[in-house]
Image (cartoon, coloured by chain):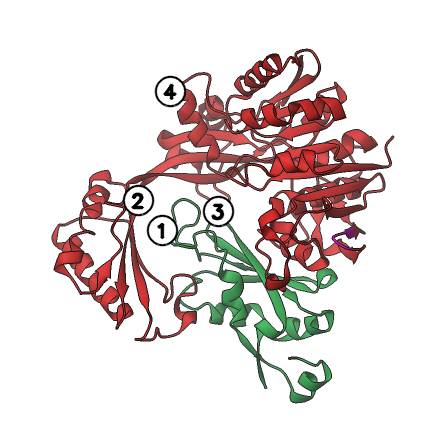
């Protein structure tokens, strides 16, 4: 058994720095590279892509990345954990096989395929059996949006990925799996942790929480002494050095920018936090009030003392559904009295929308430069502001109302208050809203499937 | 005297649906009791008047010298439904740091609050 396992975080979200995972592989020693590709509504985009093209429906960025790092991974036995499979895990695995063939690496490694998360085809059956899949946000039963559902996936935890690793997979591809599981699974696999070792599973889960947002724990988006954080242009992504006893160190490769300190880790620990005593995953319930942090040298933070409790008997389900249309239009008003002009323009626009008889579920006006982020807390805007951006958004079930709105922005330039500009981009786009419906499902309903194939 | 939270804490915020969470972290461990005493859920609800339309919940993390606040109904529906610039509540962190709290003059001196 290795004494320490190095798990590197390579992506904070789908769309993060493209070269970050490559730099994690090439910048120093690592044992595992974990890549989180799925935001809350990503699955619905992938469902649509697959409907158009049966070979699509996964994170396409993953394939060129594998091409860049595969030689190094095979040579140095670095394993890759990625929830890049989306709604077509097999398609993603096939694409990775094609890359292996292209690089003459066929049969040099194995691919683990984890599925069983997709329950889109089972929704009616589940509802019929009285599993209501009520929204965790509003308490409403799923039946009220049944006709508009676009994707439905249970979050799988670490154990199916552990099985894939135990069977020799070098690249593990999943559909909807928790970000924390991508980090926890390799640690369980290497150290042989038990399924009821709640403290250790919680420690590995918290390690995953720390690195799942990429550089947000290593100096990115950090408020504490932000000016002094070195070389963010070359920011180092985080690496967990896990030990068998459940303690770990968070660090980053030498020669990279950014910072790993007690403060950068604290900020990330609190990110998207609910009740800190009950951080619920499929694998355990981690208690964030038991975490202890200790400065362990330059860009090294030791994490210890973590306690946890047994996992619950539910899994979270991520359902996406079509929820109408929206559009956001902007114009920029210049000094003097920029804010007052933008306010006047907003009034004119709203009056025209009303005269047109357009119905919206919501119209939201913000004044960027004055109070878009902090609202009334920002105080009364000064008449001396250099400029203010008027930003008006509308939301409606009726596409044509939103469409009409997009044609009312540009006319304000010649028919409203003066010193206005900023319309070079043309009419705003109409966007279909795909909304998120989180729910719980009994664990017994979900049967993860694990398959390990030769590349 | 009145002390702005920028002198006492740093913060990070994020979202879960229509709820914004703000983690408030003492700049030095000895500031934590001040935060516990003064930055109550009621004060935070009052501070975010007109922004947070629901309840405010507070959780204590003495091990990190930090408080976590949940500000319900704050993000215009949240996620992809929201029309807000900050639909993910990422700037609620510094919005909370605008708050001023009462600290006794001798505490300001003793703790060397800048």
Number of other residues with Cα within 10 Å of mark 2, as a class: few under 14, some 14 to 19, many 20 or more: many
The residue pinned by badge 3 equals A137
**Residue A104 is drawn in which quadrant?**
top right
Look at 58% across and 42% down and name the residue there. Answer: A12
Q: Can residue A283 be seen in this view?
A: no
Q: In the drawing, what numbered circle is on residue B83?
A: 1
Which chain is indicated by disc 4? Answer: A
Q: How far apart are marks 4 and 1 (CA)?
A: 29 Å
Residue that protrudes farthest toward the bottom in the picture: B105
| First in residue order: circle 4 vs circle 2 | 4
Prevailing SS of the magenta stretch: loop
Chain shown red: that is: A
Q: On the rendered structure, is A425 left or right of A74?
A: left
Residue A299 within the magenta-colored segment of the rendering: yes
Number of other residues with Cα within 10 Å of mark 4, as a class: few under 14, some 14 to 19, many 20 or more: few
The residue pinned by badge 2 equals A326
User: Can marks 4 and 1 be said to lie on one chain?
Assistant: no
The residue pinned by badge 4 equals A52
Tell me the element at label 2.
strand
* Most foreground residue, A358 or A304: A304
* Most foreground residue, A20 or A261: A20
Which chain is indicated by disc 1? Answer: B
Q: Quadrant of the C terminus of chain A?
A: top right
Taking B106 as reference, is A72 above or below it? above
Tell me the element at label 4.
helix
Q: How far apart are marks 1 and 2 (CA)?
A: 8 Å
- Residue range in magenta is A298-302
Taking A368 as reference, is A206 above or below it? above
User: Can marks 3 and 1 be said to lie on one chain?
Assistant: no
């Amino acid at each position: 058994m290795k004494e320490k396992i190095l798990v590197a975080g390579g992506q904070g979200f789908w769309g993060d720095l493209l070269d970050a995972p490559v730099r994690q592989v090439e910048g120093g020693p690592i044992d595992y590279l974990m890549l989180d590709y799925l935001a809350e509504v990503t699955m619905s985009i992938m469902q649509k892509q697959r409907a158009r093209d049966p070979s699509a429906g996964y994170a396409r960025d993953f394939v060129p990345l594998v091409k860049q790092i595969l030689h190094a991974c095979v040579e140095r036995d670095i394993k890759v954990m990625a929830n890049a499979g989306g709604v077509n895990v097999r398609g993603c695995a096939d694409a990775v096989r094609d890359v292996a063939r292209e690089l003459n690496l066929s049969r040099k490694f194995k691919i683990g395929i984890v599925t069983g998360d997709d329950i889109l085809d089972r929704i009616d059956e589940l509802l019929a059996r009285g599993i209501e899949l009520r929204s965790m946000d509003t308490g409403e039963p799923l039946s009220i949006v049944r006709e508009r559902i676009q994707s439905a996936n249970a979050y799988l935890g670490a154990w199916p990925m552990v099985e894939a690793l135990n069977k020799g997979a070098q690249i593990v591809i999943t559909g909807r799996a928790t970000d924390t599981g991508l980090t926890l699974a390799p640690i369980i696999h290497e150290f042989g942790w038990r399924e009821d070792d709640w403290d250790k599973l919680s420690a590995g889960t918290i390690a995953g929480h720390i690195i799942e947002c990429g550089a947000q724990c290593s100096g990115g988006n950090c408020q504490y002494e932000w000016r002094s954080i070195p070389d963010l242009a070359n920011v180092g992504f985080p690496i967990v050095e896990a030990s068998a006893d459940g303690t770990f160190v968070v660090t980053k490769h030498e020669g990279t920018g950014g910072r790993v300190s007690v403060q950068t880790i604290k900020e990330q620990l609190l990110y998207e936090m609910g009740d800190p005593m009950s951080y619920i995953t499929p694998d355990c319930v981690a208690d964030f009030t038991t975490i202890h942090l200790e400065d362990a040298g330059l860009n090294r933070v030791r994490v210890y003392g973590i306690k946890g409790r047994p996992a619950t008997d539910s899994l979270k389900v991520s359902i996406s559904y079509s929820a109408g249309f929206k559009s956001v239009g902007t114009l920029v008003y210049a000094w003097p009295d920029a804010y007052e002009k933008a306010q006047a323009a907003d009034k004119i626009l709203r009056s025209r929308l009303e005269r047109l008889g357009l119905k919206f579920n919501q119209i939201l006006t913000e004044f960027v430069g004055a109070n878009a982020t902090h609202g009334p807390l920002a105080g009364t805007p000064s008449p001396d502001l250099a400029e203010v951006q008027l930003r008006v958004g509308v939301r409606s079930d009726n596409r044509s109302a939103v469409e009409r709105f997009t044609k009312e922005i540009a006319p304000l330039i010649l028919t409203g208050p003066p010193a206005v500009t900023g319309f070079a981009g043309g009419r705003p786009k109409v966007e279909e809203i795909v909304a998120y419906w989180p729910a719980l499902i009994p664990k017994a309903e979900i049967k993860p499937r694990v398959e390990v194939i030769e590349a | 005297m009145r002390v702005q939270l920028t002198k006492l804490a740093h913060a990070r915020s994020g979202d879960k649906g229509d709820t914004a969470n703000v983690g408030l972290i003492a700049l030095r461990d000895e500031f934590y009791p001040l935060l516990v005493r003064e930055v109550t859920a009621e004060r935070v609800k009052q501070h975010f008047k007109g922004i947070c339309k629901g309840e405010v919940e507070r959780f204590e993390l003495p091990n990190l010298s930090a408080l976590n606040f949940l500000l319900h109904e704050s993000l215009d529906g949240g996620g992809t439904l929201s029309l807000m610039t900050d639909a993910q509540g990422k700037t609620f962190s510094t919005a909370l740091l605008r708050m001023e709290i009462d600290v006794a003059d001798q505490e300001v001196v003793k703790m060397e609050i800048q």
